[in-house]
Image (spheres, helix red, strand yellow):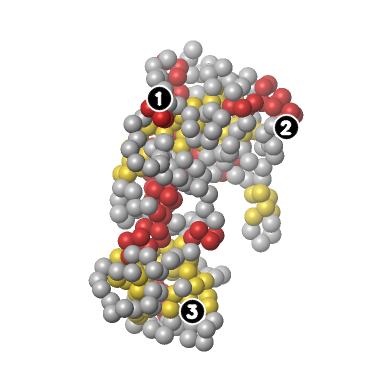
Amino acid sequence: MKKEELRIVYMGTPDFAVEALRCLVAGGYNVVGVITMPDKPAGRGHKLQYSPVKQYALEHNLPLLQPEKLKNEEFLDALRTWKADLQIVVAFRMLPEAVWNMPRLGTFNLHASLLPQYRGAAPINWAVINGETETGITTFFLKHEIDTGEVIQQVHVPIADTDDAGIVHDKLMMLGGKLVTETVDAILDGTIRSIPQEEMGMTGELKPAPKIFKETCRIDWKQPVKRIYDFVRGLSPYPSAWTELVQPDGTTVVLKVFETEKIIKPHHNLEAGSLLTDGKTYIHAAAQDGFVSIRSLQLPGKKRLKTDELLRGFHIDNSFKMK
């Protein structure tokens, strides 16, 4: 079968999923339908906002479904009418067997980690938070348990010490588009040899990548400097690490922190979160084994600023602290 004849249904929602869909369309593959999440209210006016994948599908006149529930018979009937040979899932949601088992060639997923490591909803964030020096992307066939299906192909990608989650996201997104088309080609050619994840020779404990909530993102200043540095970049630019700035009168203001630098040097038993600042150009917060230099941050209702920009309009001195 030629790629123009293979009937593909594509499922995805965020920006990360657009690149693979773009590669399929640009490459002449036969995408017969797209499935994405229902529109969601956003912004002050709570206007319904299209997902990035929906926006792309509309711009390219691709048939579109936005089911509330994936087990709904009306949706399943509509999906059957597309007569997919293959389904591709990128950053969507957990599928019931009635969906993933429908096409004759199965359903494969693009996951932003080197499976079996970092199964879960936030693999990019957790890899950076944990200080990994390498991550990657994996295509695998879907089965019952989430992110456990047989691996088709993988690409390894280094993580630089200066990379944040946004940089890693963009690297993996671009490589993911290419890997998706390569995986489709391998399925068409009959050259794939998928491998059960338990046979991949992993050593050590598996690291999970659970969904991240607001409280997950709070900085613990009692941690070592390197740990805090990795934590901040692993959550930057989204959803972003945060801390409370305690003012001399005891009132607090929430600060989002996007960028830091490591200062590994002993201090004289300063309490975690104590500040050293000239009030003009720098803010250093005491951690377990040194200081975290805060380079980029944001006050509530304001835009993200470099530290010197923020200090021009907001007073902070050494009597303030982070907690």
Query: Of the residues shown, which amino acid type is indicated by label 3?
Result: Val
Query: Of the residues shown, which amino acid type is indicated by label 2?
Result: Asn
Element carrying mark 2: loop
Which is more N-terminal, label 3 or label 1? 1
Q: CA distance from mark 2 to mark 3?
A: 50 Å
Q: Which residue is mark 1?
A: 195
Q: Residue 234's spot in the image, x, y percent?
A: 41, 55
Vertical arrangement, residue 23 with respect to residue 319, above or below: above
Q: Which residue is outermost to the top? A: 1
Which residue is at 69% across, 59% downward? Answer: 45
Q: Residue 141's spot in the image, x, y percent?
A: 49, 27
Which is more N-terminal, label 1 or label 2? 2
Element carrying mark 1: loop
Q: Quadrant of residue 101?
A: top right
Element carrying mark 3: strand
Q: Which residue is outermost to the right? A: 74
Q: Quadrant of residue 107?
A: top right
Which residue is at 29% across, 69% downward? Answer: 289
Query: Of the residues shown, which amino acid type is indicated by label 1?
Result: Ile
Give the crowd class for mark 2: few <14, some 14-19, many >=20 residues within 10 Å.
Answer: few
Residue 246 is tagged as 3
Q: Residue 215's spot in the image, x, y percent?
A: 53, 61
The answer to whether residue 238 is left or right of residue 76 is left
Which is more N-terminal, label 3 or label 2? 2
Q: Which residue is mark 2?
A: 72
CB atoms at circles 1 and 3 under 8 Å apart?
A: no
Which residue is at 67% across, 42% downward? Answer: 38
